[in-house]
Amino acid sequence: MDDLDTSHLEWDTPLYRLAVTQLDRTAERMGLSEAIWHRLRTPQRAHLVLFPFRRDNYDTVDTVFDYRVQHLTTMGPTKGGIRYDRGVNLGEVTALAMLMSWKCAIMNLPFGGAKGGVRIEPSEFSASELQRITRRFTSEIIDVIGPDRDIPAPDLGTNEQVMAWIMDTYSQQKGFSVPGVVTGKPIEIGGSLGRREATGRGVVSCMVESCRHLGVAVEDARVVVQGYGNVGANTARIARHLGARIVAVSDVRSGIHDPRGLDIAEVDRWIAEHRFLEGFPNAEPVSNADLLTLACDVLIPAAIERQITAENAARVQCRILVEAANGPTLLEADSILAERGIFVVPDILANAGGVTVSYFEWLQSLQHFLWSEEEVSSKLISLMQNAFRDVLGLAQQHGVDMRTAALMRGVGRIAEAKRRRGIFPWRKQPKAGEREGRRESGRGARRARWLIRKHSPGSASRAFSRSPSSGASRSAPRSGASRSAKGTRCSSSTACRSAPCSIRSFPRSTRTHTIPSATASPGSTCTRSSTRRSAS
Ligand code: NAD
C-alpha cells in the first residue's frame, strides 16, 4: 500500500513499525478493505500532555511528558494500561494501543484498545512524587477517560496504588465515587479478586494448552521467566503450583538460575526484603541476555518489548515461547523461531488474561458487585482456553502460525464491526448540479440550482406551509410527493433529463419529486424512481 507510508508520522518508532507490519501482513492475507486497513494503522485519538512538576526538594522543577492514545472506539469504550517508564514515547504507546485492540477482539470483550504512558523512571521518584505526578496526569486527561470512555489499568512500572490515585482524583473532580474509571485497583475501593494474578494466570493457561497440544508434560516442565514483576512473578508462582520447574527468573538488574528448580517462595521472601534479585543465595547469577538462551521447555518473556531478536533467536533453546510481555519478539526473530519449529503463543493472546479480568472488574464496579475469586478464576480460565483453541483451530485451518491466526481473528472481528457500523457522516448530500465532486458553473447552472432550491421537496413544503389557503403546518413532511400540491404527474423522461430535477440532487431517497416550472407545469411531480447510490 504505497499511499500508506507512515515514515513521516510522529509516532513512527520501531515498536510501531512492528505492530503495523504485523497488521499489514495480516490485512494482506485477509484481503481487508483498504479503508478499514488504513484506519486501523493509526490511532483514532492521541493525547500528548506536558506539565511542570516540582520534586520533593522543592527547588527542582521537571517537565513530565505523558501520553494517552485511543486506537479504536468502534467496539466500545477504550481500555489499556498506563506505564511509567523512561523509554515511553508516542510510537510505543500507539503500538501498544493497537495490540490492545486486537487482544480485546480476540477475547470478544466490548472494548477498543488504548494505552498511556508517563516518561519517567519510577524507581527514581519517591512515593509522594509518584502520587503527585499521577494526580496531575489524571487531571490533564480527565475529559478523555471515564467508565464509558476510556478505562486505564496497571502496566509496566504502575500498580494498584497508582490506579487508586487515578480513581480518587477522577472521583474528586466528578464529586462522587467512580470505581469504574480504572481497573486493577485495590479490592477495598472496588477492585476485583483475582485481578492481580490474572495476567499470569492467563499466561499459564496458554502454557498448559500449548503443552497439551505438543504433548509436553506440565509437571516438571522447565520454565524460564524474564521479568519478575506483576506478570512474571505471578506466572512463576502459578506454574510452580501446577508442578512446573522454574529454572530461572530475572529483573531489570540481573537473573538467577538453578537447573533443579528455584524455590519460588524463597525468591518472594528475598524480593520482599531486598527489592531486586541480586545477591539471592542458592542459585547461579545469570544475565538477562543469557537467560533467554537457557535450555528449557517453556520460555516466558514477561518484562519489556524487543527481547527476542534476529541475533539471539537462533540460540533460543525452548520448545514453547509464551509472550507474557507486549511485543517481546521482533519480526525477523519470528521467522527464525518458526523455521526452528518453536511454538510461539503471541502476546495478544498470551497476556489477554489481564484485560479479561479487568473487564470482569469493570462489570463489578458498574454494578457494585463482588465476585468470588473462584468465580473470577474459573471464568478467566474458561475464556482463555476457548480463545486459545479458537486461535489454534484457525491457525491449523489456514496453515499459519499462532500470531497470524490471532491477528486474523482480532482484526477480522474489528473489520466486521466497522463494516456493520459504517461511516459517519454517511455521505455529504451533493448540491444540485454537483456530481462526482464537480460543481457545474455558469449562469444556466446557477439558475438551475435556484430553481431546484425553490422547487425541491423541502422548499415545496415550506412554500406550502406559507400558503395562506393551505393551512398546513410547518411540520408538513419534506417529501416532494405533496399530494395536495397543484400539478400533474410527469410521465416524460425528457422533462426529467432536461430539467435539473431534484431526483439528481436527492438520489438517496427521493422517489417522487417536484419538477421545476421551467420545464413542466408548476408543481407537477415525477414518479421516476431514483437510483440509490451505494454507501462508501
Ligand atoms: P512490572 O513493572 O510489574 O514488572 C516488570 C519486570 O520486568 C520487573 O521485574 C522489572 O525489573 C523487569 N524489567 C524491567 N526492565 C527490564 C529489562 N530491560 N530487562 C529485564 N527485565 C526488566 O510490569 P508488569 O505489569 O509485570 O508488565 C510486564 C510486561 O507485561 C509488560 O510488557 C506489560 O506491558 C505486559 N503486560 C502487563 C499486564 C498487567 O496486567 N500488568 C497485562 C498485559 C501485559
Image: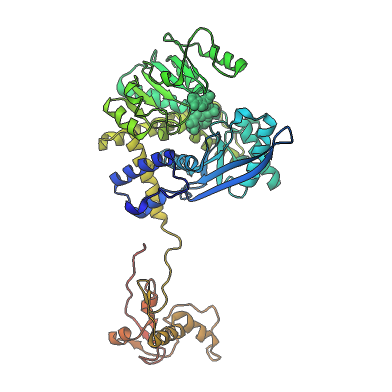
Please indicate, yes or no, whether residue 321 appears anywhere in the rendered image: yes
Residue at 44% across, 78% down: 479
Can you give x and y, in whole percent of width and height, for residue 80 in the image? 52, 39
Can you give x and y, in whole percent of width and height, for residue 286 in the image? 46, 15
Q: Is residue 477 above or below residue 150?
A: below
- Where, by quadrant of the figure, is residue 517 drawn? bottom left
| Residue lying furthest top | 282
Could you tell me which quadrant the C terminus lies in?
Answer: bottom left
Most foreground residue, 369 or 281: 281
Numbered circles on residues, count: 0
- Where, by quadrant of the figure, is residue 186 drawn? top right
Please indicate, yes or no, whether residue 108 appears anywhere in the rendered image: no
- Where, by quadrant of the figure, is residue 116 drawn? top right
Can you give x and y, in whole percent of width and height, for residue 44 in the image? 48, 51
Residue at 59% across, 42% down: 65
Residue at 37% across, 16% down: 296
In the image, taking residue 307 as reference, residue 68 lies left or right, namely: right
Residue at 41% across, 10% down: 259
Can you give x and y, in whole percent of width and height, for residue 338 in the image? 29, 29
| Residue lying furthest front | 59
In the image, taking residue 131 as reference, residue 518 lies left or right, namely: left
Look at the image and name its color scheme.
rainbow
